[in-house]
Image: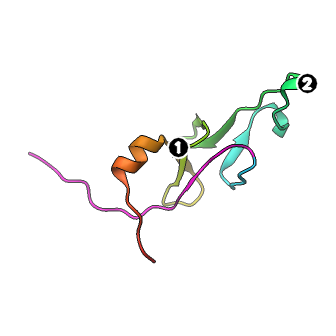
Amino acid sequence: MKFRKKPVVVKAVQWDGPWILHPGIGTENDGKMPNKAQGVEVRFYVTTIHGQRAYLASGDWIIAEPDGIHYYPCKPDIFEATYEPVEE
């Protein structure tokens, strides 16, 4: 058998680094901002619906799960191939 994925509208925002605030983003290193001069490197992540941390790279898209609490990242090339804008 073959199946087609149903069209789904998602909320998403492209993340371009720590200056982009988003309610789903967590940080390691107690939320300290990156400062290479002080040797602090912060890793940013979203928590998936499975309770796992998914780490972000600049340019990743953050997609909201239907529950509005969890998120997952998507690389820009995959996002572009999978999603298209929806007029509201």
Residue at disc 1, secondary structure: strand
Q: In which quarter of the image is the N terminus?
A: top left
Reading the chain from its start, which is encountered first: label 1 or label 2?
Answer: 2
Magenta residues, dominant SS class: loop
Q: What residue is at 41 percent from the left and 69 percent from the top?
A: 86
Residue numbers of the magenta segment: 1-18
**Percent position of residue 13, x then y:** 57, 56
10 Å crowding of disc 1: few (<14), some (14-19), many (20+): many
Q: What residue is at 61 percent from the left and 39 percent from the top?
A: 58
As shown in the figure, which amino acid type bears the numbered disc 2? Gln
30 left or right of 3 in image:
right
Residue toward you, 43 or 77: 77
Residue at disc 2, secondary structure: helix
The correct choice, above or below, for 88 with respect to 64 in the image is below
The correct choice, above or below, for 50 with respect to 9 in the image is above
Comparing marks 1 and 2, which lies closer to the viewer? 2
Colouring scheme, one of rainbow, by chain, secondary structure, one colour: rainbow
Q: Name the residue under label 2.
A: 38
Residue toward you, 31 or 18: 18
Q: Name the residue under label 1.
A: 73
**Percent position of residue 39, x then y:** 86, 22
Asked whether residue 30 appears in the rendered view, the answer is: yes
Q: What residue is at 35 percent from the left and 62 percent from the top?
A: 8
Residue toward you, 18 or 29: 18
The correct choice, above or below, for 80 with respect to 45 in the image is below
Is 2 inside the magenta-drawn segment? yes
Residue toward you, 71 or 51: 71
As shown in the figure, which amino acid type bears the numbered disc 1? Pro
Asked whether residue 49 appears in the rendered view, the answer is: no
Considering every residue shown, the one lying at the far right of the view is: 38
